[in-house]
Amino acid sequence: MFGDMMGMMGKLKETQQKVEATKKRLDTVTLEESSSEDLVKVIITANREVKQIIIDDSLLEDKEQLEDFLIMTVNKAIAKATQVNEAELGAVAKEGMPNIPGMDSLFK
């Protein structure tokens, strides 16, 4: 029993290291989201850090429209990055979990 516990602790530590490595890697994964007609583009990492916002000059005349496009496009970019982030980290966490009956449904 003690050996099983030590093995499980070692596996959890290994999983924690893999999760940290995955988080670092996700800093290098960039995603692009565009508004309709490509008037606003947002480049974001999979860890949800906005790297660049590109705005078409035609939007500079209408502050309210620009704000609307920015909000919509940034929110879409964050949602996309969150989906990638959760999928990647979930896969690593699931891989490192011990085989406990009923626990596998938590990571689907």
Image (cartoon, rainbow, N blue to C red):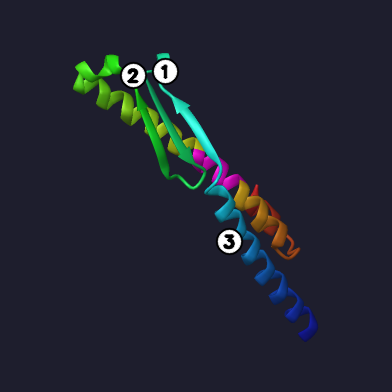
Horizontal side, residue 46 vs residue 16: left or right: left
Q: CA distance from mark 2 to mark 3?
A: 37 Å
Please give the name of the residue rendered at 27% of the width and 18% of the height, measured from the top-left corner.
Answer: 59
Which residue lies under the disc numbered 1? 38
Q: Earlier in the sequence, mark 2 or mark 3?
A: 3
Disc 1 residue type (three-letter): Asp
Using the image, determine if residue 10 lies above or below residue 104: below
Of badges 1 and 2, the one in the foreground is 2
- Where does the image place residue 70, in percent across and percent down from the top left? 32, 28
Which region of the structure is painted magenta?
81-87
Q: Nearer the viewer, residue 77 or 49?
A: 49
Which residue lies under the disc numbered 2? 56
Q: Say whether marks 3 and 1 touch (CB < 8 Å).
A: no
Which residue lies under the disc numbered 3? 20
Q: Which part of the image, by quadrant, shows the N terminus?
A: bottom right
Q: Tag 2's secondary structure?
A: loop
Q: Say whether marks 1 and 2 touch (CB < 8 Å).
A: yes
Q: Is residue 78 magenta?
A: no
- Where does the image place residue 66, in percent across and percent down from the top left? 26, 23
Q: Tag 3's secondary structure?
A: helix
Disc 3 residue type (three-letter): Glu
Q: Nearer the viewer, residue 29 or 64?
A: 29
Query: Tag on residue 82?
Result: none
Q: Earlier in the sequence, mark 3 or mark 1?
A: 3
